[in-house]
Amino acid sequence: MAELKFEITKELGVISENAKGWTKELNMVSWNDNDPKFDIREWSPDHTRMSKGITLTEEEMQQLVELFNARDEEDSFE
């Protein structure tokens, strides 16, 4: 299997942290020297290991934000 190359180009924020110190984060990540994309996944404290996650283009992230903002108040998680 070919080695996966990645670079976190911008850390946008931590969403949560688990008991083992791994953090679920929103970052801009370049995978295999491609243009950076929005990336949501869990990372080890030193960012050398990661879980499965999701990557989104600028357009997909904008659509996600629009869908989130358009939900009814009764659909809120609070």
Image (cartoon, helix red, strand yellow):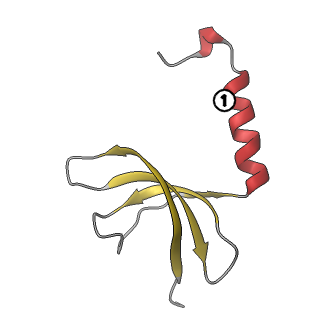
Q: Nearer the viewer, residue 23 or 10?
A: 10
Residue 64: image quadrant is: top right
- Residue 11 image position (x, y, % from top left): 48, 59
Who is closer to the viewer here, 12 or 61?
A: 12
Residue that mark 1 sits on: 68
The local secondary structure at tag 1 comes to: helix
Residue 10's x, y, as percent?
Answer: 53, 64
Query: How dense is the environment of label 1, judged by Cα within 10 Å: few (below 14), some, or many (20 and up)?
Result: few
Which residue is painted at 20% across and 54% down in the image? 20
Q: In the orientation shown, which residue stands out farthest toward the top?
A: 74
Whether 32 is drawn above or below 68: the answer is: below
The image shows residue 74 at horizontal and vertical percentages of 61, 8
- Left or right placement of residue 43 versus residue 30 in this view: left
Q: Amino acid at mark 1?
A: Phe
User: Hey, which residue is sitting farthest left in the picture?
Assistant: 19
In the picture shown, does residue 18 fall above or below 52?
Answer: above
Question: Who's the residue at 52% across and 78% down the image?
Answer: 6
Count up the numbered dots.
1
Task: Check the image and name the residue furthest to the bottom.
Answer: 2
Whether residue 36 sits left or right of residue 11 in the image: it is right
Residue in view at x 48 percent, y 61 percent: 52
Residue drawn 70% across the image and 47% down it: 61
Residue 15 percent coordinates (x, y): 42, 43
In the depicted structure, whether residue 54 falls above or below residue 63:
below
Where residue 31 sits, quadrant-wise, is: bottom right
